[in-house]
Amino acid sequence: MLIRAILFGLAWVLLSALQCYTQAWKPGVKDYNYTQIADAAALRRGTLNYTDATGANLTAYVSYSNTSSQPRPAVIVVPDYDGIGNYERWRADLLASLGYVGFVADIYNNSVAQGPALPEANRFAAMAIYNGNLTLLHSRLLGALATVRKHPQVQADRVAAIGYCFGGAAVIEFARLWPNTPGLQGVASFHGSPLVRNSSTFKPGTNVSVAIFNGYDDSGAGVSAKAKAEVQAELEGANATWSFTDYSHTAHAFTLPSNPLWTSGPAPQSAYSPWADRQSWWALRSFLLTVFDLGNLTNPYTSAGGVTYDYNSPFIGSAPATS
């Protein structure tokens, strides 16, 4: 009985400590100033006009560190359904502060007013165009890839893509375009939906690594248990290198700090999860080091050849100070 009581007491202490730790670093929305990142003064940020095979007028957001003139890997950011906004630019800046070139792809074209001000109905209408016309979506993705590979700061054979929500589904589709994706080494999808497409599948032997980060409690039809099983079977059937992570107590759009926190009750349609955001961002950092072969594989805690990729800025979970 004494041993059982001691064990119970230890378990209670550990649980209490865990709860305190979790609550201690949970940020409020006010803590996330999208213009404020580590070492912002060291970043060169701006826009880049480009086009794709359709001839559309597109404008990307590009960010990279000006502390080095050497070419480096690039990460394409595919926006969610409201297009390019401060959130996507912020993610690109975070990637730039880790040593990469952050490139936010323009999917909708620069004649569309994008970002949070885009009305909800317009967002769904714009997204529906590309979900319903994969050829057009493919053109936008390949146009972004061709453009970023020609950027003087980019190592053309080291490109990855990440995406959120609509963009998360788009980067999964990006990997399905292999072998017509020169330089694309990996894609990472954050709460992407839909996971599967009726008219598109991964090609056997694909060498584009795929990481999917999903909320277990996401109720969307595009991420149903059936869809999860199907995309994993599709990846396995193509002999791809892949991972699928479901985060517990996590709803849709869990990486967006402006979403409300889910603290109790039934799962909401979408909610911010500081825990899942933090865990998935750490996983992304490891994923990028691996696909770009930047880490010392005999010791994953060191960088390759003295290069400071990924080790020169704090992590998002530290939450920038309020301004």
Image (spheres, rainbow, N blue to C red):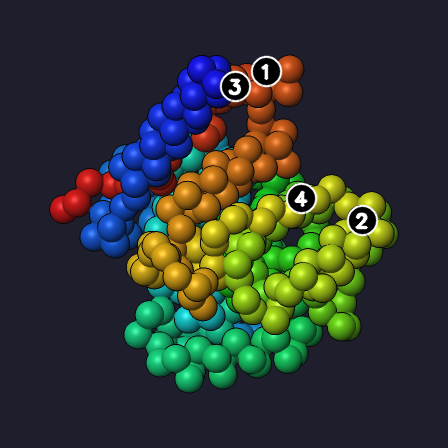
Q: Residue at x 74, y 53 (%)?
A: 232
Spatial CA distance of label 1 from label 4 is 22 Å
Alpha carbon distance from label 1 to label 3:
5 Å
Of circles 3 and 2, which is in front?
A: 2
Image location of residue 42, percent across then percent down: 29, 36
Q: Secondary structure at mark 1?
A: loop
- The earlier-in-sequence mark between 3 and 2 is 2
> How far, Cα to Cα, is label 3 from label 4?
21 Å
Instruction: Give the amino acid at mark 2.
Output: Glu
Rendered view: 301 above or below 270 = above
What residue would you read off at disc 3?
A: 301
Label 2 sits on residue: 236
The residue under label 4 is 243
Kindly indicate whether the residue at mark 2 contacts the one at mark 3 (C-beta within 8 angstroms).
Answer: no
Side of 107 where 293 appears, left or right: right
What crowding class fits label 1: few (fewer than 14 Cα within 10 Å), some (14-19), or many (20 or more)?
few
In the picture, the disc for residue 299 is: 1
How packed is label 3: few (under 14 Cα within 10 Å), some, or many (20 or more)? few
199 horizontally vs 280: left or right: right
Q: Residue 265 placed where, x, y %? A: 39, 61
